[in-house]
Amino acid sequence: MSPVIEGLLAHRSIRRFTDRPLPPDLLDTLIRAGQAAASSSFLQGVSVIRVTDRELRSAFRDIAAGQVQVEQAAEFLVFCADLHRSSRCCEWQGRTPTEGFTEQFIIATVDTALMAQNVVVAAESEGLGICYIGAIRNDPARAAGLLALPRHVYPVFGLCLGYPDQDPEVKPRLPVDVVLKENRYDDSGDRERIAEYDRTMNDYYLSRGSNNRDATWSGQMAALLGRESRPHMRGFLRDRGFEMK
Amino acid sequence: MSPVIEGLLAHRSIRRFTDRPLPPDLLDTLIRAGQAAASSSFLQGVSVIRVTDRELRSAFRDIAAGQVQVEQAAEFLVFCADLHRSSRCCEWQGRTPTEGFTEQFIIATVDTALMAQNVVVAAESEGLGICYIGAIRNDPARAAGLLALPRHVYPVFGLCLGYPDQDPEVKPRLPVDVVLKENRYDDSGDRERIAEYDRTMNDYYLSRGSNNRDATWSGQMAALLGRESRPHMRGFLRDRGFEMK
C-alpha cells in the first residue's frame, strides 16, 4: 500500500488547533494542488475566499453554530461554486450566458468538492489537520453577503486548516461491500451488514476519547433524514441565479 | 513540497490504457481510501457500481458519446449520490424519511465528489491513470436503469481506472490570484489575468502532443455557457425523488 493511501486512511477531522501559522507560500501551494484536480469541461468553477479578518471569522463562527475552530484555526477558507467567472468570459465574447440549469449547478458543485479534497490531501501531507464546515449553509445568504459574493457564486462549505492540537481516533466507515456493488445496485444483505456496522460504531462512540455517547450509525441517519434539511437552501440558490431548471 | 503534493500537481486525465488489470484487492483498497474522506453529517451518501459486464460497458460508452476509454479501461466505476441507504435506516427505526430537499442533494453530491477524489489520488499513487466521465449525465435515466438504481440514488459521474498507455502534458490551471481571494470576492483585475491565461492556454492547445487546436480558455467558457446545459437533468432528478424543494 502506497504511503499516500496510508495517509488517506489516517484522516480524521481536527477541531482543535495550535496557534502555529502556516509557513509562507504553503497556502498558495495547497490551492495549486487543489486546482490540479479534474474539472468538468475544464470549467474550473471554484473560488476560494480566505478569511483573515477577525470580525468576519467571528461572524462565520456564529453562522456555524458556534464551532470554535472556525475562529481558532490558522486558516479558514470558504469554498464557493463559481459560475460568475465563466459567465463573464461569455459576455466578453459578446454572447449571452445561459443560466440556471441544474447541470451547471452540479458541475460547479462537483468541481468545488474535487478541488477542496485535493487541498485537504495536500494539507494533511504537510502535517496540517482539517475540518470541513458544512454549517456555513445554516445561513448561506449571510455568508454570501459577508464575502460580497456576486450572483452565480454560492458558498458550498468552509474549511479549517491548521496544526492539530488533538489526536482523535479514525472513525470506522461502512463496510466496503455496502458501498461497492457490481453491475447493479443490489442492497439485499445490506440490512445485516449495517446492523453489524452499527455495533462497530456503537463501540466506537462509547469508547472514543471525547464526546462519548450511546449511538449507532443508522440511528444517526434516522435522526438526520427524519427532519427537514436546511429548507432555506432552495430559495437562497434561486435568489443567487441557480434556478434548478 | 511533499511527494504527495508533487503527485497531485502531476495529474492529467488518461484516456488510453493498457490491457493490464488491477492487482487483486487494489480496488477494495482504493474504495476504502475513498471512504476515508470526510462526509457531511457522516451520511456516507455514496454508492459505487463497478461495471464489469461487457454489454453494460458498451452501453455506457454509448451514453458517454462514444468515449472509448469507458470500454477499454481496466475498471469503470459509476459514482452515485445515495440517499436511499440512509432513508432505509430511517424506515428501520419506524420513522418517515423527509425527502426532496436541495440541501440533501448537495450533501450527497459533495460526499460523492470527495470520496471519488480520494479514490483518484489513491489510484494515481499506485501508478494508475484516471478519467472522470461526466458524460454519463447525457442520459442519466438510461444509466440509472442499466444499474437498477433505486429512487433517491443518482449517477453523478463515471470514473475510468487503468494503467496509462499515454503520457499527456499537464494542463495549465487558472492563476492562483484569480481563484483565491481574501475576505471578499473582488474580481477587479481578473479580466487581465484571464487574458494572460488565455495566451498560456492558447500556446498549450497549439503545441500539445495531440488534439491540437487554436483555442483559449475564455473562448471555451463562452461556448460552454452560451448553450443549454443538459436540460433533462432537472426532470430526471425530480423523477428520482430529488425535488429540489
Image (cartoon, coloured by chain):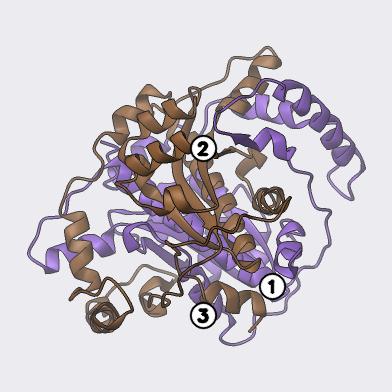
Chain colours: A purple, B brown
Q: Residue furthest left?
A: A94
Q: Residue furthest right?
A: A207
**Where residue A126 sits in the image (x, y, percent)?**
69, 76
Label 3 vs 1, first from the N-terminus: 3
Label 2 chain ID: B
Which residue is denoted by mark 3 in the rendering? Answer: A28
Which residue is denoted by mark 2 in the rendering? Answer: B81
> Can you say whether A179 is above or below A18 in the image?
above
Please tell me which residue is depicted at 66% across the width and 24% down the height of the picture.
A222
Q: Nearer the viewer, residue A135 or A224?
A: A224
Q: Nearer the viewer, residue A42 or B148?
A: B148
Q: Seen in the image, is B84 located left or right of residue A170? A: left
Please tell me which residue is depicted at 73% across the width and 38% down the height of the picture.
A174
> Can you say whether A147 is above or below A239 in the image?
below
Q: Seen in the image, is B228 located left or right of residue B116? A: left
Q: How far apart, in angstroms, are the residues tagged by discs 3 and 1?
A: 15 Å
> Can you say whether B32 is above or below B97 in the image?
below
Please tell me which residue is depicted at 60% across the width and 34% down the height of the picture.
A182
- Label 3 neighbourhood size at 10 Å, few (<14), some (14-19), many (20+)? few
Q: How far apart, in angstroms, are the residues tagged by discs 3 and 2?
A: 31 Å
**Quadrant into which the C terminus of chain A falls:** top left
Q: Nearer the viewer, residue B126 or B20?
A: B20
**Where residue B215 sits in the image (x, y, percent)?**
19, 73
Which label number is shown at residue A242? none
> Can you say whether A209 is above or below B99 in the image?
below
Query: Which amino acid does the dot numbered 1 rest on?
Result: Ser
Query: Which amino acid does the dot numbered 3 rest on?
Result: Asp
Label 1 chain ID: A
**Where residue A128 sits in the image (x, y, percent)?**
70, 71
Query: Which amino acid does the dot numbered 2 rest on?
Result: Ala
Which label number is shown at residue A125? 1
Q: How far apart, in angstroms, are the residues tagged by discs 2 and 1?
A: 28 Å
